[in-house]
């Protein structure tokens, strides 16, 4: 089952369980848009998903867990337990500190300018270049697009 269809089923079931009509969720989304969601014909933005969860009286976490439960045909408790374990593992990797570094005074920090690239790909491309391979040969050997090889071809190991 697709996530769109799983969300559609969850929205329908939650609305039915709470005895709500589509029009009663108009503060969150229009009845037309809700109908489209409940047909599985659209995917809501995070903001709309949050507004829908509030209007339905459930947390966004519960709404997503129920949706994943439907999609994977697993109990919501299994979905949440797996998520809990993942969060614990991420915390051990220092995620809390990394998250705090992303926001300053309520604003997302800007990343440094420049195009991001994969260091391992750069090393492999430069190795091929040093071996005398052409960019096309390098792309074939490494399974990369020629445009990626072309971009990395001009870089130095320190990223300049």
Image (cartoon, rainbow, N blue to C red):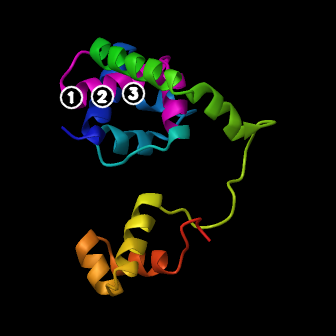
The residue wearing badge 2 is 68
Residue at 31%, 20% (x, y): give it: 79
Residue in front for this viewpoint, 90 or 38: 90
Label annotation for residue 91: none
Residue at 48%, 78% (x, y): give it: 151
Residue at 54%, 75% (x, y): give it: 155
Task: Using the rendered image of the protein, determine whether residue 36 is visible from the camera's viewpoint.
Answer: yes
Measured Cα–Cα span from mark 3 to mark 2: 6 Å
Label annotation for residue 64: 3
Measured Cα–Cα span from mark 3 to mark 1: 12 Å
Number of other residues with Cα within 10 Å of mark 1, as a class: few under 14, some 14 to 19, many 20 or more: some
Mark nearer the N terminus (3 vs 1): 3
Residue 141 percent across, percent down from the top left: 24, 74
Q: Please identify the quadrant where the C terminus is shown.
A: bottom right
Measured Cα–Cα span from mark 2 to mark 1: 6 Å
- The part of the image, by quadrant, that contains residue 63 is top left
Residue in front for this viewpoint, 131 or 44: 131
Number of other residues with Cα within 10 Å of mark 3, as a class: few under 14, some 14 to 19, many 20 or more: many
- Is label 3 in a helix, a strand or a loop? helix
Residue at 24%, 77% (x, y): give it: 140
Residue 106 percent across, percent down from the top left: 77, 36
- The part of the image, by quadrant, that contains residue 126 is bottom left
Task: Using the rendered image of the protein, determine whether residue 15 is visible from the camera's viewpoint.
Answer: no
Mark 3 and mark 2 in contact? Answer it, CB < 8 Å: yes
Q: Please identify the quadrant where the N terminus is shown.
A: top left
The residue wearing badge 1 is 72
What range of the chain is rendered magenta? 48-75
Mark 2 and mark 1 in contact? Answer it, CB < 8 Å: yes
Magenta run includes residue 97: no
The answer to whether 148 appears left or right of 70 in the picture is right
- Is label 2 in a helix, a strand or a loop? helix
- The part of the image, by quadrant, that contains residue 82 is top left
């Amino acid at each position: 089952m697709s996530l769109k269809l799983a969300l559609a089923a969850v929205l329908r079931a939650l609305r039915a369980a709470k005895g709500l009509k589509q029009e009663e969720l108009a503060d969150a989304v229009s009845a037309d848009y809700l109908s489209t969601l409940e047909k599985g014909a659209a995917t809501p933005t995070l903001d709309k998903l949050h507004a829908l969860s509030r209007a339905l009286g459930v947390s966004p976490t519960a709404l997503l867990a129920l949706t994943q439960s439907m999609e994977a045909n697993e109990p919501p408790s299994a979905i949440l337990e797996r998520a809990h374990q993942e969060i614990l593992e991420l915390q051990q990797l220092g995620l809390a500190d990394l998250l705090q570094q992303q926001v300053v005074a309520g604003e997302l920090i800007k990343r440094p300018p420049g195009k991001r690239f994969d260091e391992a790909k750069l090393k492999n491309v430069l190795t091929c270049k040093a071996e005398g391979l052409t960019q096309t040969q390098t792309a074939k050997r490494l399974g990369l697009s020629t445009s990626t090889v072309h971009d990395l071809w001009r870089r130095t190991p320190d990223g300049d």
